[in-house]
Amino acid sequence: MFPRGFAWGAATAAYQIEGGWQADGRGASIWDTFCHGTGRVWGDQNGDVSCNSYELWEEDLKCILRLGLTHYRLSVSWARLLPEGTTQRVNHKGVQYYNKLIDGLLAARVTPMVTLYHFDLPQALQDRGGWKSPDIAALFDGYARFCFQTFGDRVKLWITINEPYVCAKLGHEDGVHAPGLKEPGVAAYLAGHNMLRAHASAWHSYHSIFRPKQKGLVSLGLNSDWSEPLDRDRAEDIAAAQRSIAFTLGWFAWPVFVTGDYPEVMRTCIEANGRKHNYAGESRLPFFSKDEPAVLGTADFFALNYYTSRKVTTAGGRLDSLSVKSDVDVQEVVDPSWPICGVSWLAVVPDGLRKLLSYIKKNFGDPAIYITENGFAQVGPLEMRDVQRAEFYKQTISEVAKAITEDGVNVCGYFAWSLMDNFEWADGYSARFGLFHVDFSHEKRTRTIYHSGKEYAKLIQKAQC
Ligand code: GAL
């Protein structure tokens, strides 16, 4: 059912697994600063040590081999490579670390997919305005070029920025992710805009300077829930579902894959809500400049992170504020028939992924799609025999198979989130997403395969026969 060469992977991110936060000259990132404050993360936990993959990367490699993965998605830490964020000072120990890891993967015949930015901005650049500053696009481009130059002889699959939606909204509007800003209705759109500018600059650099020789592919990692109308026959609910997807996936995918600008419905909603609140400043949703590298066409494949679905209806103007939430004006409902896994936001809806894949095929020009994240968390009593998660993967992967064979979607790969339990952002270590259990109380951070890991390995093996 799966095409030859289909990528079977698992994903991780630097801050969530590496630890070694001060090792060998790594600079601080915004997540170090965020976690070292109080009252922000579950139990005031942090990623100082986490899975200690900085020292134990060979243990990770063993896990990857045990699963029989063909691909592994990792992220490199900007502040580990460039402690102040710029190429003026390179941390050669950081370069060595990723060289060892990449070479280790290749020697084991595992293809690396590398994310340049997974939420962890160098603190030194946050001090210069972070994602709200227009200068960040050129700074990111400098970092991206450095990575292409240093690792691009061996890495052929790149993600520039992971989940710009989450960085923009949770980091700059809700304040529940680093840098913890709560500036509703303005900062998220500005930060998101600069992420798109940064991504576009890096894609153009790769395309003109590195691609001719390195021949790799570059995209950005986009997350989206699947939204469907609460009442399929009600026009308001249908419109609410369209708005909801436009304000998550469309926000970043529309400029890159369709028009070079944001979805029209975002502009109209944001302007209308601004008028309602007598907002007199410049447009809260910035415009792309014709003098800068075009954002349209800057993805060589579609990278999708899917976790959950929602039924939606109109909020009818009840969320009365100048905020993204109020701009989109949608009320979300979790269908009572959908089981909730460990974390409260994650209702398990495997067929939502199939629907979202068809939506992407239809609206974004039938691109090659990698599902770069999808997973299920355990919270509370720990079960090594995690049958629910095993069942979740089985069902979800069967929906992916249907998307390929019945709907003709060009899916090229699937990456489970995550290889092993790790630091789950504001939830700390309370939510376990791993295919391997990690003993965080033990110095060796022992990794032990869960039942779901064994089942995922079997599934990969079967799919390749
Ligand atoms: C994504 C994120 C991952 C991981 C996952 C599970 O938003 O990219 O880092 O934490 O969610 O919540």
Image (spheres, rainbow, N blue to C red):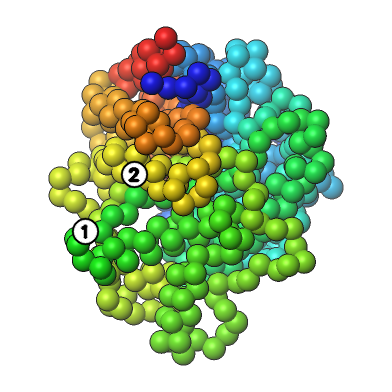
Q: Residue at x 36, y 61 (%)?
A: 242
User: Which image quarter holds the C terminus?
Assistant: top left
Q: Residue at x 30, y 78 (%)?
A: 317
| Residue 208 appears left or right of 36 | right
Disc 2 crowd rating (10 Å Cα; few below 14, some 14-19, many 20+) is: some
How many circles with numbers are drawn on the protein? 2
Q: In the figure, 176 relative to 360: above or below? A: below
Decide if residue 325 is in sight here: yes
Q: Residue at x 59, y 64 (%)?
A: 261
Disc 1 crowd rating (10 Å Cα; few below 14, some 14-19, many 20+) is: few
Find the residue positioned furthest to the top: 465
State the residue in front, 362 or 18: 362
Check disc 2 and report the residue beneath it.
Answer: 355
Q: In the figure, 368 relative to 279: above or below? A: above
Instruction: Give the amino acid at mark 1.
Output: Arg
Instruction: Give the amino acid at mark 2.
Output: Lys
Marks 1 and 2, how far apart at CA: 15 Å
Decide if residue 44 is in sight here: no
| Residue 352 appears left or right of 36 | left
